[in-house]
Structures are given as C-alpha cells and as structure tokens.
Amino acid sequence: MTELQRITSNNNGEKPSTGEYTIFTIEQIDNPYEILENCKKIVSVLLTHKELKPDSEKWKSLLPDRVVKFINQLDDLDYGNDEYLFSIPSIVSSFQNSKIRKWEWYSSKLTESGFEITFNGWCSFKNYWMIHCQMVPYSKFHIEELESMFQPRVYKDVITYKEFTL
C-alpha cells in the first residue's frame, strides 16, 4: 500500500509490523476531525505536487487555508521565538529532501478529544508544524517514539503570546 493510500485507508491507529515508528497524540482540542483532515491534506498535497518548487506561490492555494492564514500572520520574531515554525518554502523543501524526511504517514485515529498520527520511521519534531500551524499549542502534544512518551520542549509557543485570526 502506498503512503497516499494509507492516508485515506489506515484510520484505526494501525502500527507498522516492523521497524521504528513515531506517534503524535494530540489531546483536549477543539475540532480534532478538521485538524486531522488538514494534516492528511497537507501530506497528500506535498506528495502529489513534488514537481512544484518550494517557493512556488501555488502552494498557498494547495495547502489548507487554515495553515496558510496562520503562516501569513507570522513575523521574524515569531520564527525566532517558536523553533518549530517554518515558512511554506522551508516546509516544502524539507519534505522534498529525502535526507531530511525519514518518515511516511502510516495511520491515524480520532480519539474522544483529539487524534493520533502514526508515522513509519522517525518523524522529527520539526514536523510538529503541520499540527501547530492549526492553532494547536504544544501543551496538547504527546510524542511516542521507541516506546518512550514525551512532550515537546519549547522556548516559546507563539500561540501563547500572539492572537491570530483564522
């Protein structure tokens, strides 16, 4: 099964039978269905438009509006304070770089107040952006990797000091 097929088919929190995997668990949020669907759309769009250059303006029309609107409201200070925020060209570039991207979407699952995403391979904390850019604070994240559970440690969370309109 391809990664695109798993995005739409694996919706019960399936885990890879071999190898390492990473699970992002997001809890106690509003609109978990919408945020998870946006994450699926983000990865699907990045996978299906590999021919586009990272700095193409077309990304703004392909990515979910919620993410684009959030990123458009960030300034240099925000990027400096919140270390897991990235511009759209940076996001696309790192996704397209096989030396950086060491993961594939494997499955997802809605929970009572959030969702889980399971990645086949090691999904770097640099990928928090796909959830964080939807106004999900880091305090709602739990990451499981190699059977260890932790929360992201951040210097500042832009959501705690700046108001955004989406």
Image: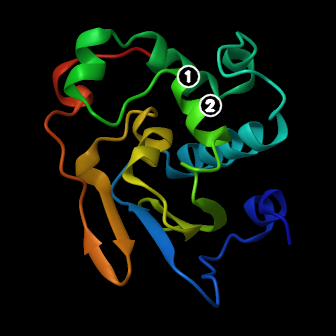
Q: What label sits on residue 111 in the rendered view?
A: none
Amino acid bearing label 2 = Val
x and y, in percent, of residue 98 in the image: 65, 49
In the drawing, does residue 99 fall left or right of residue 162?
A: right
Disc 2 and disc 1: Cα gap in Å? 6 Å
The residue under the point 50% across, 41% down is 130
Q: Are marks 2 and 1 in contact (CB under 8 Å)?
A: yes
Secondary element under disc 2, as helix, strand or loop, is helix
Instruction: Name the residue that disc number 1 marks.
Output: 88
x and y, in percent, of residue 148 in the image: 29, 79
The residue under the point 43% across, 27% down is 86
In the drawing, does residue 98 fall left or right of residue 66?
A: right
- Residue 112 appearing in the image: no
x and y, in percent, of residue 47 in the image: 77, 44
x and y, in percent, of residue 87 in the image: 48, 21
Instruction: Name the residue that disc number 2 marks.
Output: 92
